[in-house]
Image: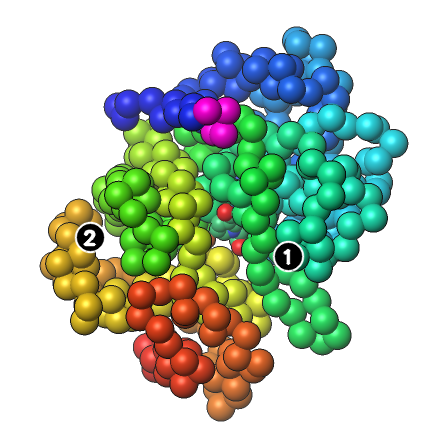
Amino acid sequence: MELPLNFHLSGRWNVISGKDCVLEQGKVIKYYSDRVLVVTGKSSGKKSGALADFEKLFKENGIIYEIFDEVKENPSFEDCAAAAKKFAAFNADGVLGIGGGSAMDSAKTIAVVLSNPDIKAPDLYARNIPCTPLPVFACGTTVGTGSEVTSYSVLTTTNGSSHSKDGYSNPYIVPTVCFCDPRYIATLPKNVILSTAIDALAHAIEAYFLKKSGIISRMFSEKTLEMMWQPFCKAINEELTYSDRERMLYGSVLGGFAIEFTGTCFPHGLGYQITLNFDIPHGFACGYFLGDFLRMQQTEYPEEVDKLLKIMNVESIDEFERVLYSVLPRFKNDANTLEILTQGGKTCRHLYNSFVSASAEITRDLYAKVLARL
Ligand code: NAP
Ligand code: FE
């Protein structure tokens, strides 16, 4: 049994965790909101049981709610703006995201648009959000993004025929309260458990070597790896217990704290292109690069890399990478693949976050290495 994840710092974060935590402690929402717009995907809220718990909670506490359950994976600004428009007349004073990163990130952006109906996508990235977004609440049902505690919302934008994924950050979209009940993870399909767990591992590992890392962020990274790696390996071949799911859910939230301090690096930036062009889920897409990311850091920071491998109890980067590639999906790899992935060179800026700077040539080389392994 893990210790509770409860953590409440100066009103910035309020993490409520444990079995039945929504029904037992959810009325804290009433302190902020009486009219809540619930934002979720087609199935996650219903299958996990989280939606039913919130409906019960809201009815018992006189909170009026409406449900938008059409969030798609890799949500776009346009979809969020359309949802905000559709529910404008409801006059919500809070937005609750139930689901994985797609639902929670959509809830954040819908909260922004409800307070700023004329806002356009570029304003988000230019940090031009004139009115404070509505309070956001979050209930995660995957074990990856940590969006429960971050100030990020990652959206897909379309420009003509090209798509890109990019996150914006705003301090007011950090969920005011988030709920982490491991019961909601029980219905997660195996491939979503594996992919989202790799996302959490990526957060911990990338955050560790970013310029903004420090004692606190590294503490979160180390604990994330300690909590995630073992149940991740177990999930490859075995059924998970409640306690495994508890470790993974809490570990993923701790990974969210790590990136909240530091941001992410090239496994994320380069992974976005793989998601968009080959329909590979976000966590898997980051996973292709994690071995090479550690190798790049090892030249300058061998002790730190060793420490992370020890925490995971893996012998070498090769061993770590072998385990990851045993679950990473293969995608179409022909003469055009490298060109498709490197078009525009946009993702290179993510490389510069790292201590080790890199160029467009290194970007190409990193993609080529991934393709050679498929
Ligand atoms: P997701 O796209 O939210 O969900 C993946 C799939 O899992 C969906 O089909 C969903 O179904 C299903 N699902 C979720 N929970 C379930 C449950 N308990 N039982 C059964 N099915 C369930 O996946 P994600 O990996 O959590 O989120 C990925 C997104 O988050 C990406 O856009 C990524 O860029 C972003 N992200 C954000 C941050 C951040 O800090 N904000 C950090 C990293 C990544 P339904 O769609 O039918 O509901
Ligand atoms: Fe991520």
Residue positioned 59% across, 53% down in the render: 168
Residue positioned 41% across, 70% down in the render: 351
Q: Residue furthest right?
A: 89
Q: Quadrant of residue 67?
A: top right
From the viewer's perspective, is 232 left or right of 131?
A: left
Other residues around mark 2 within 10 Å, as few (<14) / some (14–19) / many (≥20): some
Eyeballing the image, is 190 above or below 244? below
Question: Helix or strand or loop: what does disc 2 sit on?
Answer: helix
Q: Whole-percent x and y of residue 196?
A: 43, 49
Residue 83 visible, this angle: no
Location of mark 1 (residue): 125
Eyeballing the image, is 121 above or below 95? below
Q: Whole-percent x and y of residue 6?
A: 39, 23
Magenta part of the chain: 10-14
The residue type indicated by label 1 comes to Tyr
Q: Whole-percent x and y of residue 214?
A: 29, 47
Disc marking residue 308: 2
Q: Earlier in the sequence, mark 1 or mark 2?
A: 1
